Structures are given as C-alpha cells and as structure tokens.
Amino acid sequence: MATLVQNLPQGVDYELWQGDTWEPGTITATVSGTPINFTGYTATMEIRNAISNDVSVTLTSTPAAGITLSTLGVITITMTAEQTDAMLGEYNYDLQVTDTNDEIRTYTYGTITVKNDATVNQ
C-alpha cells in the first residue's frame, strides 16, 4: 500500500512472479490530507518491456480492465494470471490519471520485475 500526496509522480518498484495474479495493494491519493474524489476520472497504466519499449500490458479504469478508482482517493491495480504469464524480466510502467478537465498527471512510475515461476500454472 502506498500513500501519495502532492509530490507527484512518485517512484514505486514492484516484483512479482510469472503466472501469478498480481494485486500490489492500493494507492491512496490525498491533497492536504483529504482523499481525492476520483468521480469522473480515468486511469491508464502501460507496462512496457524495458529493452524493446513495446507495450506488454495496458490496464485501464474505463473500460474497467485492471484499475479501479474510488471516491475516497483509492486506486486499486490488478493483473490476471494470464497477463503475468506472458511476461518475464524487466518492465517499465507509469500510472496516469486524467481528471474531469482532461488534465493528465502521472501518479507513479517505476520498474516491474517479473520472475520466472518454477511451478507450471494449470
């Protein structure tokens, strides 16, 4: 879980296992201690291969595909086991949120390291 305040963007790195469902916890965004009401906002996260820069996975809130935004400033991110099964190695990402005035802000960025899973998923 991460709490974001006015100093954006913030670097957050993740590590996960290939073929596992990925739920890194929630991000809570506040301004002066007050949660941001994300009503009408949209979010997008592109996960790109660190070597080729090709997009491997795109998560979005609208349509709902891996990101949910709440009225209490909470951002929840999820990738399916099928999505992570197609990944291995180093990836770069950023999470951008677009407000109701079409202003875009990057909330987090960093690396995602996907480790080889020894157990074959059924």
Image (cartoon, rainbow, N blue to C red):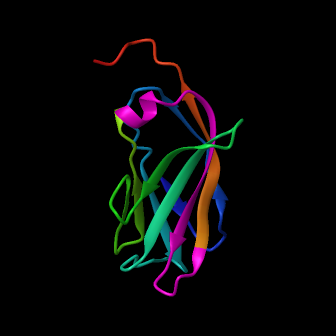
- For image coordinates 36% across by 33% down, the residue present is 82
Name the foreground residue: 47 vs 68. Answer: 47
Residue lying furthest bottom: 101
- For image coordinates 69% across by 38% down, the residue present is 52
Does 77 sit above or below residue 89? below
Name the foreground residue: 75 vs 49. Answer: 49
Does 104 sit above or below residue 84? below
Residue 24 in the image, given as x and y percentages of width and height? 44, 44
Residue 90 in the image, given as x and y percentages of width and height? 64, 33
The quarter of the rendered structure image containing the C terminus is top left
Does 21 sit above or below residue 73? above
- For image coordinates 58% across by 70% down, the residue present is 5
Residue 9 in the image, given as x and y percentages of width and height? 65, 64
Q: Is residue 16 left or right of residue 9?
A: left
Q: Specify whether residue 3 is painted magenta.
A: no
Residue lying furthest right: 51
Count of labels shown?
Answer: 0
Name the foreground residue: 109 vs 56. Answer: 56
Residue 106 placement: quadrant: bottom right
- For image coordinates 46% across by 30% down, the residue present is 86
Residue range highlighted in magenta: 82-104
Residue lying furthest left: 122
Residue 32 in the image, given as x and y percentages of width and height? 55, 80
Q: Specify whether residue 100 is painted magenta.
A: yes
